[in-house]
Each structure stands twice: as structure tokens, then as C-alpha cells.
Amino acid sequence: METTRAHGGRLRSPRGERDGFTNGSGPVVQIAGRGVGEEQPVFVIAEVGINHNGSLELCEKLIEGAAYAGADAVKFQKRTPELCVPLEQWNVMRDTPWGRMSYIDYKRKIEFGQAEFEQIDRVCRRLGIAWFASCWDLPSIELIERFSPPCYKAASASLTDHELLGGMKSTGRPLIISTGMSSLDEIDAAVTAIGDAQLLIAHSTSTYPCPVEELNLRVIPRLKLAYPRCPIGYSGHETGLAPTWAAVALGATFIERHITLDRAMWGTDHAASVELPGFERLVAQIRDVERAVGDGVKRVYDSELPIRAKLRRVPSATAG
């Protein structure tokens, strides 16, 4: 199936296609022993990120909740504060749960190091759930690589950092890129820079929390047309659950949502996260949605035959 591009990288669907929807088999990438892609169960990622607020105890509760809910993986974020915090922000004072401190000290406070990730690895192995991280700098890749993660994730903020994307891709592991706050040209440039082998692309809008009118979920089937060799998914930052189910219905092959114990907790991402009871419901109904979507082949089901025999008054001309 061919796809053409208009000026500026925007997609035009070939004649006869409707809004970018397609049927049939497509790309599959292996992550943690699971196929992620077309005609595979939706791969559900619970994004812990930095919602642990620097607490291993809180982190373990989030991992346990994600595993109980049926998530396929949990994801964290890893930064080297000295590399990721702009120098002019280092000494900006900030009120935190630990008192008033400089921004660089706050970022150091909430950042996990090797010892904490060793504990995370032990907990995830015990619970039988995969884990990986979004790395924001090259030394962070080096640290996370020690744990042989099943894949890496590049945050939307890193989409134009081709050196960083290449660093994660050079490990030989699958890479998920998020596309929030990005144009199609920027997505194209990233894919061109690192190649589309073992690459997964997540549609996203980088507003926390995101208003529903800016989710633009129809981008999901458009990305499928644009990048036919890449599984396409959805990384959501909305407050509700229904848009994520809609993303599955529109063809998202993997889903990522932030999780929290309490959306009112202190921290930048909690308000755009799903509390654990809601996340359990989210996963359960993702499974319902993926079963309900089906394969797109119109058929008469055996369960319909008694109803048809009872209620249809005029036999079909094509019957027999």
C-alpha cells in the first residue's frame, strides 16, 4: 500500500482509503518475549517515570500495582542532572517536600542511581514484569544498559537529539520514540537519522494533563501509513481513560500511561497520571476493546443464526 507526502511532510491517503485506516498484518517488534505490533495483544506500559518522588518504598508500591493490574512493563526516567538541567536553572530556589532548595539539588534528590535500579530490577524479577527507562543523556544509557533492558524509550523532548537516539539504538535493543510537541518533519528527521529497524513510534501530545481536544487520536492511523515498518502506539497524558481505549480502537499497538498512588501528590507528573484502581480498569477494558475491534471481516456469527431464523422474514437472495 503506497503513501504519498504533500509539501511539508503531511500525508495524503491514496484514493480509496478512508482517513488512513488500514487492515491486514503489519510490523511486529519483540520486547520482553512479547510481539508488539499488528495482530498482537496491546502492549501496556505503566509509566512510573519520576512519580516515585525519590522514594524506593513508593516506587515498589507502584511496580506492584502495575503488575497486579496486568501491565506488560513498567518504565522509569533516568537523567544525569548536571547534564540535563540548564546551568542558569541550577541555583533557582524551589519549594519541595524536603524544604526549600536549589533546582539542581532537587533534581539530584529525586534521581535514582545504580543501587536504586538494582532494587527495582529485583522487585520486577520477583513480580515477573519487565522494566526499562527513558534515558535523557548518554551516561544514563550506560547505566541502564547494565541491566539488559528489553528496550529503550526516548521522551518527546529528546526527539530532535539524534545523538541520544543513536546512542540508544546502538545498543541493538528496540527503541520507542514519543512524538509530542513535534512536527511530521521532525519525526521524519529522527526516523531518517536512526533508521526504522526495531523502531516503535508513539503518538503523544506533551501537555500535562492534556485537554481532550488536543489529543488528536486520528494521528495514530496516519502514522501507520507514514511508517509501515514501525509499530505505532499511544502515550497519553489525559486525565480520563476513554481516550486511551479509543486509541486502541484506532489501532495503537502499545499504550503508555503514567501511574500514581494519588493524583494530588506533589510532583510534576502526578496530575496527568492514573491512580492504580483506575489503571487496573484501564488494562482490563483495553483487553475488551482489542477483542471487540476484531479483524474487520464481515461475517454471520453462529450466535446470530437462531435470531436470523426467527426474525428475518425475507430470505437472502445469496443464501445457499
Image: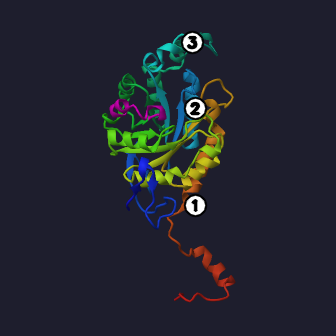
Which residue reaches farthest front? 7
- With respect to residue 313, does 36 lie above or below? above
Q: What residue type is labelled 3?
A: Val
Mark number, residue 292: 1
Please state which of the two labelled residues, at mark 1 or mark 2, is closer to the viewer: 1
Measured in 3D between alpha carbons, the distance from the residue under mark 1 to the one under mark 3, in whole angstroms, is 51 Å
Q: Position of residue 242 (x, y in %)?
A: 64, 49
- Callout 3 crowding tier (Cα within 10 Å): few <14, some 14–19, many ≥20: few
Measured in 3D between alpha carbons, the distance from the residue under mark 2 to the one under mark 3, in whole angstroms, is 30 Å
* Residue positioned 51% across, 63% down in the render: 18
Does residue 249 appear left or right of residue 128 in this picture? Answer: right
Magenta part of the chain: 154-167
Please state which of the two labelled residues, at mark 2 or mark 3, is closer to the viewer: 3
Q: Is mark 2 on a helix, strand or loop?
A: helix
Q: Which amino acid does label 1 sit on?
A: Ala
**Residue designated by label 3:** 92
Q: What residue type is labelled 2?
A: Leu
